Amino acid sequence: MKAMTDLLALADINATSDVVGGKGAALARLARAHLPVPNGFHVTTTAYHQFIVANDLTTHLTAALAQLDASRPMTFESVAQMVSDLFARAPLPPSLVQAIDDAYRALGHDVAVAVRSSATAEDLGERSFAGQYETFLNVRGTAAVHEAVKRCWASLWNARALRYRAQQRIAPRALAIAVLVQEMIPADVAGVLFTAHPVTGARDCVVINATWGLGDALVSGLVTPDTFVVEKASGRIIERDIVEKTRMRVCGEEGIVEQSVPLAQQRAPALDDARIVELTRLGVHIEQLAGMPMDVEWTLAHNRWAILQARPITTLG
């Protein structure tokens, strides 16, 4: 892969958290373990720093961040907008453009991809930045990928992230951000799996949330998912809560579209028992590799599983 310090293959042994962020490093480990992670590549933290230096953005960032005032909440919004505008106007260095274009085309002709932020302080066991940075789904074409990468970088400085870091007393200069570009999975079913009970803390069961279509409908709160609780040791389903699911999000010709769930599926379970057992085994395997309880985002498309993210559960005692 061209410009190896700027881009890395998904499963590259050098894809550590300081190089590709927490999310990227976790998925790289799973890919090396031959788990079903969608193919793709990392735009590394080196590329982010190269972009900052090439456009002389450090001075502008420092000036913008100096305007933050915790006693004036609107300063977080105004600073975030200033940074977003700076990044939007700044061009990618030509060598990075070529590297991204080569890696994107290697995935396939005009293939749809998910472009996802992966910050260096993200998905850590002691704190979670879940949902703070941007993800762009069903992105097609090199120009759109370039734009999505820059918008992911800018999201390191969005208002929500700035507030959180101020509360956690995390120094801005201690951070960097990578971007993960992966083949887009047009999910039939998607959801989240917890390898420990997120409410009771029980470690002997898996909790699965599942809904029709893409998982961002669940994450955004558009839908209430089906819930299954499964014993790890036996694979026995000990609780199930099937809800009416009337809306879903799917891949459209351009971007993501929301639509009605077909009537026959609205009251049907999103996963049958055999799939629930398969997914439980997959979750337990991921937990064993990580050595700790995990929160796993997954999809099922054309009868094939895909793992989109795996991070430690930070809410357990």
Image (cartoon, grey):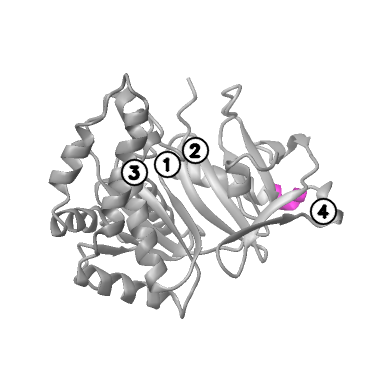
Numbered label attached to residue 290: 1
Q: CA distance from mark 2 to mark 3?
A: 34 Å
Query: Residue at horizontal 17%, vertical 38%?
Result: 63
Q: Earlier in the sequence, mark 3 or mark 1?
A: 3
Q: Viewer-nearest of labels 4 and 2?
A: 4
Tell me if I can see residue 20 in this picture: no
Front-most of residues 51 and 273 = 51
Residue drawn at (32%, 48%), measured in percent from left and top? 84
Type of the residue with mark 1: Ala
Which stretch appears magenta? 271-276
In the rendered structure, which disc, 2 or 3, sits on the residue that comes first in sequence? 3
Q: CA distance from mark 4 to mark 1?
A: 35 Å
Q: Nearer the viewer, mark 3 or mark 1?
A: 3
**Residue at numbered disc 3:** 81
Q: Residue furthest right?
A: 264
Please name the residue that numbered disc 4 is placed on. 265
Residue 204: where, in percent of width, then height?
Answer: 60, 30
Pointers 1 and 2 in contact (C-beta within 8 Å): yes
Where residue 4 appears, x then y in whole percent? Answer: 22, 66
Tell me which amino acid carries mark 4.
Answer: Gln
Residue 299 x/y as whole percent: 60, 55
Disc 3 residue crowd, few under 14, some 14–19, many 20+, Cα 10 Å: some
Q: Dot 4, how many residues are within 10 Å of its Cα: few (below 14), some (14-19), or many (20+)?
A: few
Residue assigned mark 2: 294
**Badge 1: how crowded within 10 Å, few (<14), some, or many (20+)?**
some
Work out whether residue 273 or residue 9 is closer to the camera in this orientation and state it: 9
Closer to the chain start, of discs 4 and 1, is 4
Under tag 4, what secondary structure?
A: helix
Could you tell which of marks 4 and 2 lies nearer the N-terminus?
4
Check contact, mark 4 vs mark 1: CB within 8 A.
no
Residue placed at 37% from the left, 62% from the top? 147
